Image (cartoon, rainbow, N blue to C red):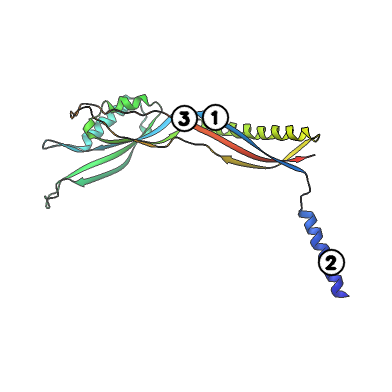
Amino acid sequence: MKKLFLLAALVATTFGAFAQTTDLRRKIEVTGIAEQEVTPDIINVSISLKEYLNGKKKVTISQLEGQLEKAIAEAGIAKGDFTINSLSSWNYQTEKKKNPDFLASKQYNIKFHDLNKFDQILSKLDAKGIQSTNIDSYDYSKINDIKNELKLKALIGARDKAGFLVNGLGDKLGSVLNITESDNSSFPQPRMYAVQYKAASADIAPESDIDVKKIKLSFQIQAVFEIK
């Protein structure tokens, strides 16, 4: 008899716990989406300079760097937006085992707010000393503000959609029970720009074909509401 009583008590306890954890409220789950395109106003560009031989004379990385620093200052770019990224060198006369000579290269990162200044800077550099240029990343200075606006817009859109559907059935929309956010934004891919020469002369500036592609901000809100 004791065993039967304990078993009945255990079944009653389990059923009670199950009833407490089961949500019997009527619910509706909807999705809201908000999107916006913005033109990047921050473009991070890397420029790689390399030493080269002009006959027997070596054009040094210090000379090339001096040109770049001067061009950066004349373009009005802040010092904090111009940094050194990496430094390397290689032996260009391997037969000289005792006193090998090296050619150095140096990579710099420049944060542009106006890409017109990019061509302005390149036009003042020794084109033979430019190894490559590359857009590393794009950004937008007020991106966090836009993201917050889109998230709220997507949430309100989800609420309005749920309200419309529930009202169509003669019911009323209750409080939100759960919100799930998804960021589906897409940024332009970094791109390498090869340096082209119109002639072999060192005073000819390289050409660039950099264009600014838009950033697409897209947010999806999955929301669950109670139906009253």
Which marked residue is nearer to the observer: mark 1 or mark 2? 1
First in sequence: mark 3 vs mark 2: 2
Residue picked out by circle 2? 9
Q: For the image shown, how many numbered marks are present on the structure?
A: 3
On the picture, is 163 further left or further right than 76?
right
Write down the quadrant of residue 178 in the picture.
top right
Residue picked out by circle 3? 214
Q: Position of residue 78 (x, y in %)?
A: 37, 29
Residue picked out by circle 1? 36
On the picture, is 38 further left or further right than 160?
left
Disc 2 secondary structure class: helix
First in sequence: mark 1 vs mark 3: 1
Picture quarter with the C terminus? top right
Which marked residue is nearer to the observer: mark 3 or mark 2? 3
What's the residue at 87%, 71% (across, down)?
5
| Between 199 and 60, the one nearer to me in the picture | 199
Name the residue type under label 3.
Answer: Lys
In this picture, is 37 found above or below 92?
above
Instruction: Give the residue at the far front of this rendering.
Output: 169
